Image (spheres, rainbow, N blue to C red):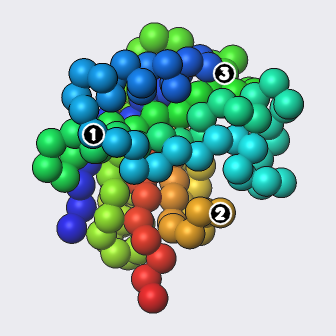
Amino acid sequence: MITINPYLNFAGNTEEAFNFYKSVFGGEFTLVIRYKDMGETCDSTPTDENKIMHIALPIGQGNMLMATDMIGEMAKTLTRGNSDSISINGGTVEESGNLFKALSQGGKVLVPFDKSSWGSYFGMLSDQFGVQWMMDCPIEQ
């Protein structure tokens, strides 16, 4: 089953923001990954290693608020208006790949849809209207 969740990008204050959201919405983080947890697959600097690579806070039934700290080259392009993405999660690799391909028509693929280091298929794109999308689905067994 596919779900759609908001994904927010921050300029280094994701942890502060999400502690605030947790105080507002309640619940517990289901996942917190720091850049240092990514090992050699990530080009983080010592300054960035404790920043949030990915965090997820469940809100309501089946909804997830997620975010990251933008670092390196990504941080240079972060401005209000491009700091949010829509994350599509779940489904089959084929279904997710087809959605990714369709959404990318006339847009720009930022990260090709392929196997990720965290055990799923993942991709990012900006569609023809400038909306940023992320696709993440489990690797089928």
Q: Amino acid at mark 3?
A: Ala
Q: Residues within 10 Å of mark 3 (few under 14, many from 20)?
A: some
Q: Is residue 106 left or right of residue 47?
A: left
First in residue order: circle 3 vs circle 1: 1
- Measured as percent of width and height from the top left, residue 64 is found at 29, 44
The furthest residue to the left: 61
Please tell me in which quadrant of the rendered image residue 89 appears.
Answer: bottom left
Give residue 75's mark: 3
Helix, strand or loop under label 1? loop
Whether residue 129 is visible, yes or no, is: no
Which quarter of the rendering shows the N terminus?
Answer: bottom left
The furthest residue to the bottom: 141
Q: Is residue 14 left or right of residue 99?
A: right
First in residue order: circle 3 vs circle 2: 3
Pointers 1 and 2 in contact (C-beta within 8 Å): no
Q: What distance separates the C-alpha of mark 3 from that of mark 2?
A: 21 Å
- Measured as percent of width and height from the top left, residue 9 is found at 49, 26
Q: How many marks?
A: 3
Is 138 situated above or below 113? below
Give residue 27's mark: 1
Q: Which residue in the structure is indicated by mark 2?
A: 117
Helix, strand or loop under label 2? loop
Q: Residues within 10 Å of mark 1 (few under 14, many from 20)?
A: few
- Measured as percent of width and height from the top left, residue 47 is found at 81, 24
